[in-house]
Amino acid sequence: MRIRTFLGATVAALLVVSACTAASFFPQSVASGDPHPDSIVLWTRVVDSAAAPDADLSVSVAVATDADMAQTVAGRDLTAKAAYDHCVKVRIDGLDPDTTYYYQFSYDDGVTVHLSPVGRTKTAPAADSDRPIHFAVAYGEDYIGRYYNAYLDLLRQHPDDVDFVLYIGDYVYETTGDPSFQKTDASRKMVFSDTAGAIQLGTPDAPDYAASSLANYRTLYKTYLSDPVFREVRAAYPEVVIWDDHEFSDDCWGAHATYFDGRTDEYEPERRRHAEQAWMEYVPTEVGLGPDGTLDINQDNLYPNSGDYRDYRYGMNLHLILTDYRTFRPDHLVPENAFPGAIAVDEPTIQQMLGQAGYQGVAGSLDPYVNIDLLAAGGLNILRQTATLILSQAYAMANPAFDQAAALAKAQEVLHGNISATYLNLLFQAAGLPAPITSQIESTLPRGLSFLFIGKQDLYSSTGSRYLVMNDAFRLYAAARFMATNGAAENAFGSRQMAWLQQTLAEPPAAWNVLVSSVSMAPMVLDFTNPTIAAMLPPTFPDVLRQRLLINVDQWDGFPEMRAIILGMLRQLPNPIVIGGDIHGTFVVNHQGVYEFTGPAISSESLQDMVLNKAESLPQLASMPGLDQLVTHLDQILQLSAQDHEHVTPANIVATDTASHGYLFVTATPDTWTATLRLAPDKSVDTSYYDDPEALDTLFHNLTFELKDGTLTSMSGQ
C-alpha cells in the first residue's frame, strides 16, 4: 500500500519492544481531537487476545515533539477498561499552543511492551495569534461498497498544513446494507455478530439490519476503522467531530427512529444511549470525558442528558461554533403517519395569518373540508360509517401490526373533526363507490390546508412527510405551527442549546465566525412552475407534480422559521459563515449576507442518486421515460428555483454540484476566507485507488471561492 504513513518506534531501555505487533494490539490505530491551545484529546483501543475479555488493561501514552518519540514532554498511565470496549481516551493538558506533537501508546502484557503507531497532532494557536487557519471538512463516509478515496487525496494534497479535520456527521452508518442507498460488495460489507440485538429491516428472505445493541454500534466503528486510509487520516490530523443522524438512526429526532414511518412506536432511548456510548468510546472528542480527563460515560452524559454542542477558538481568525441538530429537535412537522385527510390548518387560521385579501388569493389552491362530526350529528352518520369501513381496510393493508379491530379503531380515531372533502371522495372512489361530495357542495365548503395538499398521500410514508413536500403549502403550514406553538414546533436546537448559542454568539467575535450545522441550510426547491424548468420536463411529467417541491425537509428546509431566526442572529456578527452537511451535495449559498458552504459527502450516495431513487419509488414517475435525464439537470433546477424569493426562502445558490464526492478545504486569514471544494465523479467511490494514489490527481478537480470584504469571488479557472 503506497499511502504515506507517520509510524514511528521507540526503543526503551531495559524493555523488550515489539512495534511490529501494533496492528494486533492496536487494531484501530490512534487518533486525536478537540485541540485547545494547551490541550489535546488522544485515543486508541487496546486488544489482548490472551487476556480475559472482561479484564481491564494497563496502558501508557507518551507525547513528544519529534516523530521518533525521543523528546517526550508529557505522558500518562491509563486503563483500557473492558466496560468501554478497551477504548482509551484522555485529555493531555499543559501543552504549548500552535505546536505539532507526536504521541504513542504502549501496552505491557508482562512479557513484551507493545507499541501503537505514532500519531501526529497539533494544538490550537494562542488567542492573540493571527496566523492563517487551515482545516478540512468531511461527512457522509458510508463504508459499504464504497472507498475513501477523498481521504487518500487529502493525505496527498495536504500532508502538513491541516490544523484539524472537521467531521460534521454520519461518521458511521447504522445499517448493514440498506438496499435503498447502500451497495453490496464482498470486500466492503458490514456484518453484526449480534443480529439478535439488531433491528431487522428488509424482508425475511433478504434481511438487512440496523444497529441497536451496544455491541452492534461498536461493530460499526471497528468495521469503519478497518479501512487503512481512514485510520491514517485519524492518525495524521486532529479531528473535531459532531454527530448527525446515522450515528444513531436515519432521519432521527431525539431518541425516535423513522424506519417504519409511524407504523410502530420507534421511541428507543436505550438504543440512543448505546449509539452515544459507542460514539464517545471511539471518537477522540472531549464529550464523554470525566473530571480527570479520561473516559467516564454514565447517565449524566447520555440521552436525555447528552448533547455534543460546544465551541472552539483558533487564534483571532476562527471561532468554530458546533451545534447539535438531532438530540433536542422535535418531530418532523408532518409526521410519517399523519392522516392525509386531516385538515392541518383551517380556514379561520389562514384568514388570521394572511388577512382576508391574502386568503382570497390562495383560496383556490386550498382543500374544501367538512366537519364529519357535525355531519354525523346532523343525520349523515352513514357517510362516516362507510368511510370508516373503507379506511379500516386501508389501515389493515398498510400496517402489518394491525388486526381488524386495531385497524377499525385507528380509522375511527382519525375520522373526526375537519376532514378533506377531496380525500373523502378519493377514498370512496378507490372502493368503487360514487364520490359523496359533489362539486356543487364543495363550492359551499370552507377551505383549509390538508396533509393531502402538503403532499402526504399514503397513510404511512416518508414522501409528503420528510421528502418531496409541496413547498407553498408546507411553508404556510410551518408558519401556522410555529405561531400555534410559540416556536416549539421548530425548536431544532432545544431551549438549553439555544440559550447557549445566544450566549456564545454574544462573545467577542473572531475574524470569521462559523456556525457548524450537521445539516445544510441551503434551499432545495424544485420549481416545476418555472417556465425554464418546465421546458426541461418530459411530456408525460404528471400535472399534479408541476408545482414547487421541497426535496428534503429533514434538514433546515423543514424548519424554515427557525432557520430565519438563526440566520438573523448570525447577521449581527462580522463575517458570519455556515458550514453544513448531510445532503450529499455541494452548495455555496448566500443567505442575504451569511455565506454557507456545504461540501460533498466523502463516499455516501450522491444527492442526484438520492433524488432519482426517491422519484422512481413514486407510482406517478416510476416508469416515466426521461426521468434519469431530468435528474442530471438537478444543479440547474435548484439554482433557478432558489431565485424566486417570493415563494422560496431568500437565498442565492452561487454554485452547486449534486453528483460529486470529495471534501471541503478552508483557509481563514484575518481578511480572507478561501474555500476549496475538492471534487471527484460520483462513481469514483466504487473503486479503490489505495494502490494507485497518483490516479487521484486527474480524478479530482477544484472549485474554489474567496470571500473578502463581504464579496464572494470564484477563483476556479484563474
Image: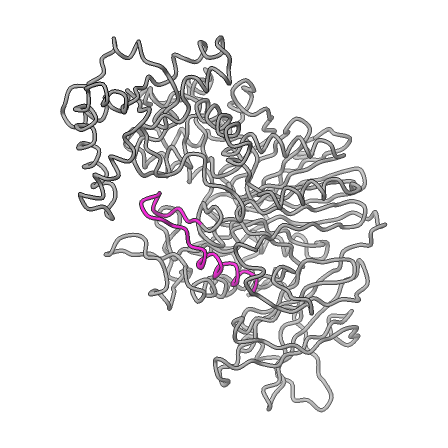
Residue at coordinates 66% horizontally, 51% vertically from top-left?
310
Where is the N terminus found, in terms of image quarters?
bottom right
Residue at coordinates 35% horizontally, 14% vertically from top-left?
446
Q: Is residue 278 left or right of residue 667?
A: left
The type of colouring in the image is one colour
The spot of residue 603 in percent (x, y) is: 50, 50
The spot of residue 626 in percent (x, y) is: 34, 28
Q: Point out the stretch of residues depicted in magenta.
A: 256-281
Residue at coordinates 81% horizontally, 41% vertically from top-left?
670
Residue 142 lies in the magenta stretch: no
Which residue lies most toward the right here?
128
As rendered, which of 348 and 366 lies closer to the eye? 348
The spot of residue 406 in percent (x, y) is: 22, 44
Among the 4 quarters of the image, the one containing residue 404: top left
As rendered, which of 250 and 375 lies closer to the eye? 375
Among the 4 quarters of the image, the one containing residue 630: top left
Q: Is residue 380 left or right of residue 138?
A: left
Residue 258 lies in the magenta stretch: yes
Where is the C terminus found, in terms of image quarters?
top right
Among the 4 quarters of the image, the one containing residue 617: top left
Q: Vertically, is 368 above or below 285?
A: above
Q: Vertically, is 66 above or below 616?
A: below
Numbered marks: total: 0
As rendered, which of 417 and 395 lies closer to the eye? 417
Q: Is residue 538 left or right of residue 89?
A: left
Which residue lies most toward the front here?
377
